[in-house]
Image (cartoon, rainbow, N blue to C red):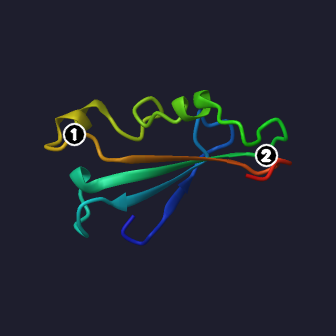
Amino acid sequence: MARGAGVICANSQSGVDDLLLYCYRDKNLGRDNIGVIEFQMKNDMQYGKTIHPYLFDAMDPFHIGVFDDECDELPDGPMPVIRIVAALASKEIS
């Protein structure tokens, strides 16, 4: 993370394709200061402008192992999570 690296998940990874980590409050890298941006790319024409909530539910960082239960014990609770789903093959324009 200190070098700006991200994570590309394995094929068939449940719920997430890519992860980017970031320092939340300041520039000090530490367990209690790391947030995550999760990406899911859909390259299928069945996905368009319609939002599918189950895709976002599948990106739960606790379920897929990004965070553990100890994050709840941090002074301000778990770090922020940004979830992004992209419909790459959509024929609709928003």
Which one is nearer the viewer's eye here, 2 or 86? 86
Look at label 2 and name its amino acid. Asn
Pointer 2 local density, CA inside 10 Å: few below 14, some 14–19, many at least 20: few
Distance between mark 1 and mark 2 Cα atoms: 34 Å
Where does the image place residue 18, in percent across and percent down from the top left? 57, 51
Report the side of 24 relative to 4 (left or right): left
Mark seen at residue 43: 2
Q: Residue at x 17, y 35 (%)?
A: 73
Q: Residue at x 59, y 33 (%)?
A: 14
Total marks in image: 2
- Residue farthest front in this picture: 94
Where does the image place residue 69, in percent across and percent down from the top left? 28, 30
The first of marks 1 and 2 along the sequence is: 2
Look at label 1 and name its amino acid. Gly
User: What quarter of the picture does the N terminus occupy?
Assistant: bottom left
Given contact means CB atoms under 8 Å apart, are the residues at marks 1 and 2 in contact?
Answer: no
Can you say whether 62 is above or below 30 in the image?
A: above
Q: Mark 1 sits on what residue?
A: 77
